[in-house]
Image (spheres, coloured by chain):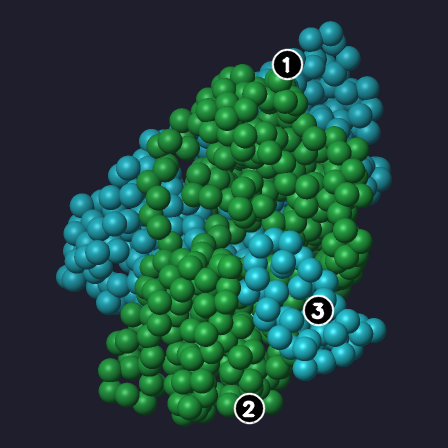
Chain colours: A cyan, B green
Amino acid sequence: MIRLDSTSADFGSAFTALVNARREADADVARDVAAIVARVRDEGDAALRDLTQRFDRFDLDASGWAIDRAQCLAAYEGLSGTLRDALELAAARIAAYHLKQVPENSETIDDLGIRLGARWRPVDAAGVYVPGGRAAYPSSVLMNAIPAKAAGVKRLVMVTPTPGGEVNPLVLAAAHVAGVDELWRVGGAQAIAALAYGTDKIAPVDVITGPGNAWVAEAKRQLYGVVGIDMVAGPSEIVVVADAKNDPEWIAADLLSQAEHDPTSQSILFTDEAGFADAVAAAVDAQIEQLATGETARASWDANGAIVLVPSLTEAIPLVDRLAPEHLELACDEADNLFELVRHAGSVFLGRHTPEAVGDYVAGPNHVLPTGRRARFASGLSVLDFMKRTSFLGLDERGLAAIGPAAVALAQAEGLPAHARSVAIRLDR
Amino acid sequence: MIRLDSTSADFGSAFTALVNARREADADVARDVAAIVARVRDEGDAALRDLTQRFDRFDLDASGWAIDRAQCLAAYEGLSGTLRDALELAAARIAAYHLKQVPENSETIDDLGIRLGARWRPVDAAGVYVPGGRAAYPSSVLMNAIPAKAAGVKRLVMVTPTPGGEVNPLVLAAAHVAGVDELWRVGGAQAIAALAYGTDKIAPVDVITGPGNAWVAEAKRQLYGVVGIDMVAGPSEIVVVADAKNDPEWIAADLLSQAEHDPTSQSILFTDEAGFADAVAAAVDAQIEQLATGETARASWDANGAIVLVPSLTEAIPLVDRLAPEHLELACDEADNLFELVRHAGSVFLGRHTPEAVGDYVAGPNHVLPTGRRARFASGLSVLDFMKRTSFLGLDERGLAAIGPAAVALAQAEGLPAHARSVAIRLDR
């Protein structure tokens, strides 16, 4: 963890180094992924079976390619009542939030009688990637699948690796709650390729979302354009802007909730009192000792954590904008005023009783958010990722007479005579 | 041009071949582009100068790196009144259409007192690539720059190669009309890299849009994630659904307005009368002879053109959906009814007096549209490409008490104890 003071002489260069620090590994997997993608495109299910045997160590033909809805229902029914209720509460709130995102169609008729508008439609089919192993998170199933269903996607396909044949019942239960239509036991770059190109068993989809390792991310990048994808995701991060009226234990807990994800995660505190900074730093150290995930959290905090002292919380905001964090907590009285000043953040958590983790699970907004300063230009996952817009136009003779000549002039100036003629030929009558 | 009849025995396989025909060249430029991108990242302006000397054959230091606003104004003032008026009409209509796309912020308070919402902000800076040479289209400047300005982007940067030092005055005039803030005389992959990483002279941007050759497209793909980009664009295409009441000359002109773009462009007619199909085919052949762009149009029509006979126009629509065309003309009485059935198309042109070309220039909707069947999942360029959404959340003690325990249960089930603790610690008080 580094401590910075925005009033010190060398702050400018030190903060720039913090902003520019690369936490994303340059995994050189492009060639491997290209070979896997080509094999799945050319050989289909045979390639899937072979690659699954190699990477996940089980035989799809022997163990079953798909997990059916009955198995998902059984997994759901096998959960404790507390967990079932928690999943249902989360799903209901996520659905309510995302249904409000469904855009309205538009149509206007201007003063020349020209009809203009835009119409939104869901994609036909969407694929959700769910990692296997340790990072198999049911919350991730809900956050990816429910927006697709809210968009109106008819066919929602989930793929997840089941290493050694082992299936995570929480993930199956979440698939049941989210209404996933198909679930295939394939993972890695080969699963992304199967969703993009289709195989005999797995019909292709139009959009693929969901987190994954470097191979999965690279496969999505290579297949971008063949299918739609969500944003490239990097390590998680949180920025907390907190005054000294907070309990340091609460703020330390918030910083650690990101640090425990991965050694590459990042947690940064901005505060205006040095004594509070000291208290939070001490609380972080004490809490790490009690965490089952303490080793990861320690590695993240030591390598990427930071506490930045600022003269006032308002002065923190331009610095926060340079970080464009995935998560931003404003734990102070003036949270709303500060939020007005924020230009770049994936999701903002207002006030002292809004820990970021409540948003990871049950609050409603999506937890798939832009990382690595991408909030400068990217947004969290939404129903828009599962829909597309068709613009439309309708002219009658009067409308074409009014604006057609300008189109003819521009087409001629651009050296496109057939464009010009297709308009002019209708003006001559 | 191929002729198909949807009632013939072999139609299924023939139409599938048409849908799957690849018109996009697999330009193997990835390695060259990676080298150029790395050089610009590491060497900045020196690399730009050297690469511009090599590819565009002029010296940026000697000829000037930037084109200032006065030069754009002078180019505008040098145009004929007809062209000035046409650009102004186009700009005004494009601005009016795109200003309607600016999304509204949302905020609700649910029955637990939990505040939820989303806030949209423009990106700080956007870059528009404008190709040089033959394909230097002022309409493309307007279609990329005006949505950025409508989004509220403060700094709008245009880059365009000026091969041999030659500048296209129409492009400068369009930059003046669109309100471009900076204009740099660089092109190719090196220009994309400069916009993404920034150099001493050119500050970085957050989003890059605009058409380009294979090098430009590959550079955008490689830098996707460092910056936001618009969709990967392929050859242009039009599908026309027309009944026999149309003048065959009009429909032939529409088909040729796409065919003249490039030999890889595609024009397809669906109609329900064989005699009308014959008349259009004859009109296409006759009109090509009179076109200055006839050679290109002939190559496109011969290689990629198609006329598909269907028993009724309604039966054309599921076939159109499989093509998911960039442009779709519905030139028939029942245009609105057919449009209701369409699932996948970039932009739709309704009725007999709405040639697609009027949409290319002056109607208002964007002409940057998904090609190559990408309308299945992608949309045309819009203000949303220049904005991003920040979700937000605000809980008080009551709200956290209501939903916090479910978050704790899910975090514990996912093996993330610090997530659970950051919520639980606030519930214990």
Give the residue at mark 2.
B245
Question: How busy is the neighbourhood of tag 3: few (under 14 within 10 Å), some, or many (20 plus)?
Answer: many
- The residue that appears at 67% across and 57% down in the rendered structure is A410
Q: Position of residue B83 (x, y in %)?
A: 74, 54
Compared to B235, does B154 lie above or below? above
**Subunit that carries the residue with mark 1:** A
Amino acid type, callout 3: Gly
**Residue A425 coordinates in the image, percent (x, y):** 62, 75
The structure residue drawn at horizontal position 53% and vertical position 79%, both measured from the top left corner, is B249
Q: Residues within 10 Å of mark 1 (few under 14, many from 20)?
A: some
Q: CA distance from mark 3 to mark 1?
A: 58 Å
**What is the spatial separation of the Cα atoms under label 3 and label 2, in whole angstroms?**
22 Å
Say which quarter of the image contains residue B114.
bottom right
Give the letter of the chain under mark 2: B
Question: Mark 2: few, some, or many residues within 10 Å (few <14, many ≥20)?
Answer: few
Q: Nearer the viewer, residue B135 or A138?
A: B135
Does any portion of residue B218 appear in the rendered image?
yes
Position of the N terminus of chain B by quadrant = bottom left
Which badge, 3 or 1, comes first in the chain's sequence?
1
| Residue B301 coordinates in the image, percent (x, y) | 40, 67
Tell me the residue at 57%/62% (across/down): A417
Left or right of residue B120, residue B351 in this image: left
Q: Position of residue A246 (x, y in %)?
A: 75, 32
Pointer 3 chain: A
- Which residue in the structure is indicated by mark 1? A14
Kind of residue at badge 2: Lys
Residue at the image point whose x is 48% and y is 52% from the top: B233
Q: Which residue is mark 3?
A: A404
Q: Which one is nearer the viewer's eye here, A351 or A220?
A: A220
Q: Which disc, if any, is residue A419?
A: none
